[in-house]
Image: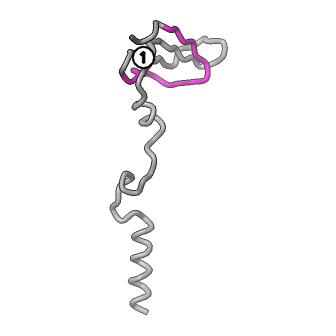
């Protein structure tokens, strides 16, 4: 009976991670952190709005050639993108 209890606690411990971090378990990182690794291939400026009428700005994104996007606020499906040119 005692050995079943110990075995059960060991199994539960392994199911809860047992101190293993996400990188060791092969868990994918958050979407935002994946997007932060993107490299800009064009220079652009994007303004994100709260609705389709573009009444309230809720975020921006500036893309510089060869760098990761510089973002503020939040992204929405309502945006206007201004292309500033191709990268050399």
Where is residue 9 shown, x and y percent of the image?
Answer: 41, 77
Where is residue 26 shown, x and y percent of the image?
Answer: 42, 53
Question: Of 1 and 15, which appears nearest the observer?
Answer: 15
Quadrant of the rendered image containing residue 11: bottom left
Please report the residue visible at 60 percent of the width from the left and 11 percent of the height from the top.
55
Please check the rendered image and state whether residue 79 is part of the magenta-colored stretch, yes or no: yes
Question: Of 67 and 70, which appears nearest the observer?
Answer: 67
Q: Which residue is mark 1?
A: 63
Please report the residue visible at 61 percent of the width from the left and 12 percent of the height from the top.
54
Question: Of 4 and 63, which appears nearest the observer?
Answer: 63
Q: Give the tally of numbered discs.
A: 1
Q: Label 1: few (<14), some or many (≥20) within 10 Å?
A: many
The stretch in magenta equals: 67-83
Please report the residue visible at 40 percent of the width from the left and 32 percent of the height from the top.
37
Viewport quadrant of the C terminus: top left
Identify the residue at the far right of this view.
52
> In the rendered view, does 48 fall on the left or right side of 17?
right
Please check the rendered image and state whether residue 2 is part of the magenta-colored stretch, yes or no: no
Please report the residue visible at 41 percent of the width from the left and 30 percent of the height from the top.
36
Where is residue 28 shown, x and y percent of the image?
Answer: 45, 47
Circle 1 sits in a helix, a strand or a loop, which is it?
strand
Where is residue 70 shown, x and y percent of the image?
Answer: 39, 20
> In the rendered view, does 10 fall on the left or right side of 78?
left
Quadrant of the rendered image containing residue 4: bottom left
């Amino acid at each position: 009976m005692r050995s079943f209890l110990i075995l059960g606690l060991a199994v539960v411990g392994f199911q809860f991670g047992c101190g293993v971090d996400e990188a060791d378990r092969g868990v994918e990182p958050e979407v935002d952190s994946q997007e932060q690794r993107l490299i800009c291939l064009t220079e652009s400026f994007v303004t994100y709005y709260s609705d389709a009428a573009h009444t309230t700005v809720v975020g921006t994104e500036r893309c510089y050639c060869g760098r990761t996007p510089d973002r503020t606020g939040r992204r929405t499906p309502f945006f206007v993108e201004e292309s500033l040119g191709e990268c050399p």
